[in-house]
């Protein structure tokens, strides 16, 4: 927990998974990522893959990725 600049917590009300993600930055670039998960194997695997993917990315890239994922995956859930 120490040494990270940002901590984001979230949970899925449908399945009960919860997660905390921590990011460390050097200026605008992600230098380290860690997560703690109380969830299924699939959510942990996804968090692990995403953690590796965002290392080395800058904040604007992460924001853009988040918007795309939200639009593409949450759009089918809208009624």
Image: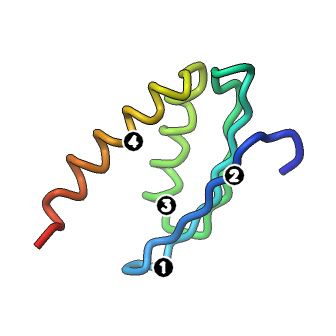
Q: Which mark is residue 41?
A: 3
- Tell me which corner region of the image, top left, top right, bottom left or bottom right, holds residue 52: top right
Under circle 4, the secondary element is helix
Mark 4 vs 3, N-terminal side: 3
Badge 1: residue crowd in 10 Å (few <14, some 14–19, many ≥20): few
- Where is residue 25 shown, x and y percent of the image? 72, 28
Identify the residue shown where x is 70% and y is 24%.
31
Question: What residue would you read off at disc 1?
Answer: 16
Q: CA distance from mark 2 to mark 1?
A: 19 Å
- Where is residue 60 shown, x and y percent of the image? 47, 26
Q: CA distance from mark 3 to mark 2?
A: 21 Å
Mark 2 vs 4, N-terminal side: 2
Side (left or right) of 5 relative to 3: left
Question: What residue would you read off at disc 2?
Answer: 7
Question: What residue would you read off at disc 4?
Answer: 66
Q: CA distance from mark 4 to mark 3?
A: 22 Å
Under circle 1, the secondary element is loop
Q: CA distance from mark 2 to mark 4?
A: 16 Å
Identify the residue shown where x is 87% and y is 39%.
3
Name the outermost residue toward the right: 2
Looking at the rendered image, the disc whose residue lies closer to the viewer, 3 or 2, is 2
Mark 4 vs 1, N-terminal side: 1
Looking at the rendered image, the disc whose residue lies closer to the viewer, 4 or 1, is 4
Q: Would you say the residues marked 4 and 1 are in contact, meaning their CB atoms lie under 8 Å apart?
A: no
Q: Quadrant of the C terminus?
A: bottom left
- Tell me which corner region of the image, top left, top right, bottom left or bottom right, holds residue 74: bottom left
- Tell me which corner region of the image, top left, top right, bottom left or bottom right, holds residue 15: bottom left
Q: Nearer the viewer, residue 21 or 15?
A: 21
Looking at the rendered image, the disc whose residue lies closer to the viewer, 2 or 1, is 2
Under circle 3, the secondary element is helix
- Where is residue 41 shown, x and y percent of the image? 49, 60
Mark 3 vs 2, N-terminal side: 2
């Amino acid at each position: 927990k120490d040494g990270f600049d940002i901590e984001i917590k979230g949970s899925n009300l449908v399945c009960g998974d919860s997660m905390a993600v921590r990011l460390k930055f050097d200026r605008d670039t992600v230098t380290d990522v860690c997560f703690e998960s109380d969830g299924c194997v699939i959510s942990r695997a996804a968090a692990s893959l995403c953690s590796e993917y965002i290392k080395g990315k800058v904040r604007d890239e992460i924001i853009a990725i988040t918007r795309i994922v939200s639009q593409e995956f949450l759009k089918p859930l809208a009624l």
